[in-house]
Image: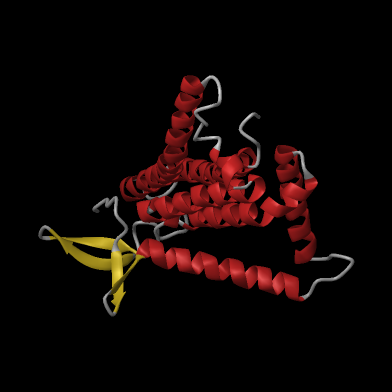
Amino acid sequence: MVISIAAEKLFSIGSFPVTNALLIGVLVSSLLIWFITRVTRRLSLVPRGMQNIVEIVFEALLNLVESVTSDKKQARQFFPTIVTIFLFVLLSNWIGLLPGLGTVGLNHEHEGHITIIPFIRSTSADLNFTLALSLMTVILVQFTGIAALGAVKYGRKFLVSPFQKPYVIGTAVGILELVSEAGKVISFTFRLFGNVFAGEVLLTVMLHLVPYFLPLPFLFLEIFVGFIQALVFAMLTLVFLKMATLPAEH
């Protein structure tokens, strides 16, 4: 068994490498698109079956978003983005816990030993994905702030006019705000990657050492951690979006 921080390549399409994390990401995206399309295709005024369950879940999530924004219009504006992030990260975290984690894959020779390149690896356990998602999230926050306040008013959070008093303190605060925006990318990236990757490594080791009952408590723990990490990522995104729409004086 070889534990790799980087996602392992399964095959290539031309010169484009397809890793196990990328493959799982495509499967999760396809599953979400298929499920939502199927549910929305048969909508009725009186919900029943799967539509009833989906509406209950979405209504609970919308109430949660409204409790954070304290603004129904803004909640409905942010809701699609927040729910998409939450569901994608949640399924990406949980799909890495399916049977076969670290044990089913392609044979690979590493330093003279035959090892396995697993088919299943959570997308969140790939640093490339968490970095890309974090960058898109932080860029979205900036565009949301500019759209809500205007470029000049939003820029006052970071750049203080020389005629504004106290100029020195305002400039220092603006610099700290810029640093914090860059820090959000690092925080988002390594929080999600670190928790999910560490959980997968723990489960893989346990499955190889004691492959029957001992890994079960860790499996349930990782199910809970996967949910919490998806919720934290989505809620932090929501909070940052809300803060971006507030003027500098607030």
Q: Residue furthest right?
A: 46
Q: In this view, does 96 lie above or below 239?
A: below
Q: In this view of the protein, which residue sits in the foreground, 236 or 2? A: 236
Compared across the picture, whether 58 is left or right of 119 comes to right
Q: In this view of the protein, which residue sits in the foreground, 144 or 51? A: 144
Q: Where is residue 146 in the image (x, y as percent from the top left)?
A: 59, 48
Q: Position of residue 26 (x, y in %)?
A: 47, 68
Compared across the picture, whether 233 is left or right of 23 comes to right
Compared across the picture, whether 212 is left or right of 30 comes to left
Q: Is residue 162 above or below residue 55?
A: above
Q: In this view of the protein, which residue sits in the foreground, 199 or 92? A: 92
Q: In this view, does 69 lie above or below 125?
A: above
Residue depicted at x 29% and y 50%: 5
Find residue 100 and report its image quarter. Answer: bottom left
Residue depicted at x 36% and y 55%: 128
Q: How many marks?
A: 0
Residue depicted at x 77% and y 42%: 71
Residue depicted at x 56% and y 51%: 143
Q: Where is residue 53 in the image (x, y as percent from the top left)?
A: 76, 59
Find residue 7 and report its image quarter. Answer: bottom left
Find residue 34 and report its image quarter. Answer: bottom right
Q: In this view of the protein, which residue sits in the foreground, 174 or 123? A: 174
Q: Position of residue 94 (x, y in %)?
A: 51, 54
